[in-house]
Amino acid sequence: MVVGIFDDEIVWTNKIANYIKDYFMLIDNKDYEIKTFASLNALISEIASINLLFLDVELANNMSGFDVAERIQEIDPAKPTICFLTSHIEFARQGYRFNAFRYIDKLHFEEIDEAIAAYISSVAKAEYIDCKTSDGIDDRINLAEALYIEKRDRKILFHMSDGNIYYGEGNLKDLAQKYGKAGLIQVQRSYIVNMKYIRGADSRVVIIIDGTEITIGRERYQNFKKCFFEWRRNSM
């Protein structure tokens, strides 16, 4: 597991890094690496290797953590998992548009423990299913990395966070019921979305973090609204 820290104040960077080291020592886990960054270019050059990123909201040089998150999502809309750090918790609502995993108050470092534990738990609960690549080769995918799932003709298409599409067979309703606890919810007859990767939603459409807009079935909206609210509440 690679943990990244982006903070342009070395004092805070060291405090956060030392706290993370203490936590991994407490849980007797040596399988981790911490990478620290003070510039956007340095972070971008290694972004593909980072699993969990602690990102300061208040940065210098007319740049914010939200600007950094936006740049990251232009490169890879699903990775890494981002936890925002701030001394001003009123900024938390802005983090929703970047699908923040957690929003951590710098005055309460104990929240870092919970964020790491929740991330490790989410990885452990990954759901793998058999499918085929676009070339017809048998493969396995982690449903936690599916942005959305589409029923097209008799095939099920899994649209993944890395941009690849995999193919399978079956019933969307069964998939949604079986993997609902993993954040999958059916929003209309032909689509399941992963709530983890929703950028925004209203009464008509769900917007996925890659920009895809999916219409919500009228009869499904109230259930979607309830489930999405609970998902957000439990994820923050």
Image: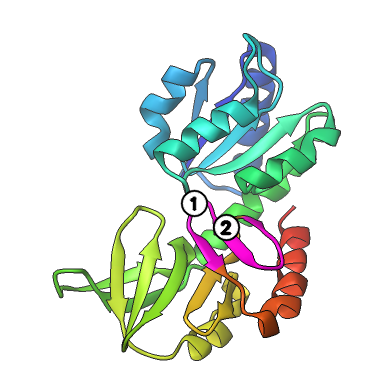
Classify mark 1: helix, strand or loop: loop
The Cα atoms of the two marked residues, 2 and 1, are separated by 6 Å
The span picked out in magenta is 200-214
Foreground residue among 176 and 2: 176
Amino acid type, label 1: Gly
When the figure is inspected, residue 122 is found, relative to residue 41, above or below; the finding is below
Foreground residue among 127 and 16: 127
- Which residue is identified by label 1? 211
When the figure is inspected, residue 207 is found, relative to residue 30, above or below; the finding is below
Amino acid type, label 2: Ile
Q: Residue at x 48, y 34 (%)?
A: 72
Q: Is residue 211 magenta?
A: yes
Q: Give the label on residue 207, or none.
A: 2
At label 1, counting other C-alpha atoms closer than 10 Å, the crowd grade (few under 14, some 14-19, many 20 or more) is: few
Is residue 51 in view? Answer: yes
Q: Give the label on residue 226, or none.
A: none
At label 2, counting other C-alpha atoms closer than 10 Å, the crowd grade (few under 14, some 14-19, many 20 or more) is: some
* Residue 156: x %, y % from top left: 35, 80
Q: Is residue 121 magenta?
A: no
When the figure is inspected, residue 126 is found, relative to residue 37, above or below; the finding is below
